[in-house]
Amino acid sequence: KIYVQASAGSFNDAAIHSLFAKKPLLKDALVFSGSPTQTFQNAYAHNALAFSAVENSTIEGRLVKATVDALKQYEIKTVVASITTAIEMCVLMRKDEFERKQPIVQLASHPAALKQINQWKKNNTVKELAIPQGTAAAAKMVSQKQVLAGTVAIGSCALESLYSNLVVLEKGIQDNRNNETTFLLMEVAKRVETVDEDQAKEALKKAIRFKPSFFSNGQEQ
Ligand SMILES: O=C(O)C(=O)Cc1ccccc1
């Protein structure tokens, strides 16, 4: 089993399937685990690998905050594989609300996604609802009416086929056309003593620089 950040329909879900397509030997059952901390905790507890977003080309500072936070308590023992994929951000609304011309009042998404759509937000100034469990979890909440009327989810356009009562209002709203995120497949372990933010950042940068050589051909991907 591989413990994967976020949930079905998330960018992590899409990324690990791209990795499997490139490296079929890595294929395994997936257990979606929400936040990176929860993902690392599950992977460590079950002696299995963890998969998580680590770096984005548009986020200031590049490193994914939630993964840095997880690395205060966990360490990366081995990087098994890495994959960098393009990320397209879409706006999804409930069909019934769209049909009755409900204005957008709130954005629900993963905090990292909310940081990649600053240009779009300038023209759509509304409330934000951060969902650490991921973009697909945000879409599920919108689909199931667990949020304020007029709340849209920001996430993958593929969420439209996962939740049949959602429609894509806009595509490609991310700040950079070539918005890319790097994800790592890792062996992790619980730290004996927690480290601070700067040390966690250094540990993550080191892991990203590391070129996986066992399962791959030793080239940076
Ligand atoms: O929430 C998701 O879909 C995730 O997989 C986490 C994430 C969020 C934003 C960019 C990349 C990954």
Image (cartoon, rainbow, N blue to C red):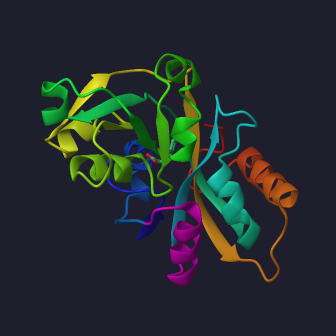
Q: Position of residue 33 (x, y in %)?
A: 44, 66
Q: Where does the N terminus fall, quadrant-wise?
A: bottom left
Q: Position of residue 129 (x, y in %)?
A: 47, 46
- Give the residue drawn at x 75%, y 67%: 72
Q: Is residue 161 left or right of residue 118?
A: left
Which stretch appears magenta?
33-47
Count of marks overlaid on the render: 0
In the image, residue 99 above or below residue 139:
above
- Give the residue drawn at x 21%, y 45%: 162
- Give the residue drawn at x 28%, y 55%: 146
Q: Nearer the viewer, residue 93 or 78?
A: 93
In the image, residue 127 above or below residue 104:
below
- Give the residue drawn at x 64%, y 70%: 188
Q: Is residue 170 left or right of residue 61?
A: left
Q: Position of residue 207 (x, y in %)?
A: 74, 53
Instruction: Kindly tell me whether residue 213 is visible in this rendering.
Output: no
In the image, residue 53 above or below residue 94:
below
Q: Where does the C terminus fall, quadrant-wise?
A: top right
Instruction: Kindly tell me whether residue 98 is visible in this rendering.
Output: yes
Q: Magenta residues: mostly which secondary structure?
A: helix
Residue 42 within the magenta-colored segment of the rendering: yes
Q: Position of residue 30 (x, y in %)?
A: 37, 64
Q: Nearer the viewer, residue 158 or 209?
A: 158
Q: Is residue 51 left or right of residue 193?
A: left
